[in-house]
Image: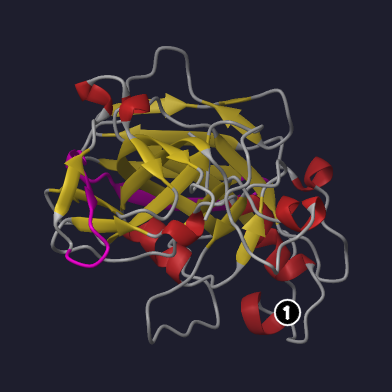
Amino acid sequence: MKYFVLMVGCLIALVGCEAERDPSSLFGPDASGVLVVDALLIVDQPLPRVLVSETVNANVRYSERWAGVGDAEVVITQGGQTFLYSLGSSSGSYMPPPNAPLVVPNTTYHLRVQSRGREATAQTITPGRLDIREATLLDDETLEVIRSLKRYEDGNVEENRVVYQDGLLEMRFDPLPVSGYHIAIENLDPESDFVIYSDLIDDEDEQAEFERYGSSPAFEAADGIVRFPWFAVAYAGPHVIRIYAVDKNWFDLIRSVPEFFQDDDGNAFQLGGLAGDNFERPLFNVDGGIGIFGSASADSVGFVVLPRPPQ
């Protein structure tokens, strides 16, 4: 699973990049040395690695190599179980113990990070399991079902062949008592053809600006219905849509950072709030530090995008 919120990069950027605002308005007169934690628990997946770094002064260029914290004690607890993490192959990357159990739904997890007298703590309550029970292709105008799509458990999702911008993809699931949802889409073929036809996009350099991976702002889906927007697709070939039911920590952070970020592979992550939201400071929900210790459950749908026939 790709993190569609690369926390360390975007959080450090808030204090490490040049900006018109005084950095002290975000974190205080001296923003350096604040612990930054990054861990996202996914139901039915192994315990994640935990990234630990620290903020740097606003007039110092951020470098992941030396901003990573390599001497931390990292512990996740759940009920009567304690999982002591160990330092991984790179500074600031901590790995769970071998044979740690999978993340379970509707359960409280606690994180504690200690380093040189500093301590950051957080907790998350994992959502229940998310199950996409139906995926269909709808008529654009009447919203009548054109055909049903196969889920991964139904068989070969490559049979879900859809012509670009022909109809609406709709997914239905039983709503969960969560703060909100988040969608990520990924093109699985890095060599597939560009499918957007426009006089404004006429060369390969302009096409290369379109990403093969993206994600949505935070949103609510109280009715358990999500319709997928075609504007997030730019390439033909196999795709996967992942829907995440997210906890309060995850939801709060992505809706309070209305920016675009990229990871080291160039994947674009679109964050953004709900209508009316206006945050001067991201909502971290981490005591003694900043970052994210959140959780989600997820399900996915696969389909193949076909280019539109020549007009």
Q: Is residue 6 left or right of residue 142?
A: right
**Residue 89: which quarter of the image?**
top right
Which three-letter amino acid code belongs to the residue tagged 1?
Answer: Pro
Secondary structure under tag 1 reads: loop
Residue 58: horizontal and vertical position, in percent? 81, 71
User: Front-most of 73 and 19?
Assistant: 19
Q: Is residue 292 left or right of residue 174?
A: right
Q: Residue furthest top?
A: 99
Label 1 neighbour load within 10 Å: few <14, some 14-19, many 20+ = many
User: Front-most of 44 and 168?
Assistant: 168
Q: Is residue 253 magenta?
A: no
Residue 49: horizontal and vertical position, in percent? 53, 32
User: Front-most of 286 and 14?
Assistant: 14
Q: Which residue is mark 1?
A: 23
> Which stretch is magenta?
115-142
Residue shown at 64%/59% (left/top)? 261
Q: Residue furthest right?
A: 60
Residue shown at 83%/44% (left/top)? 66
Residue shown at 78%/66% (left/top)? 16
Q: Is residue 123 above or below residue 76?
A: below
**Residue 23: which quarter of the image?**
bottom right
Residue 76: horizontal and vertical position, in percent? 41, 35
Q: Is residue 136 magenta?
A: yes
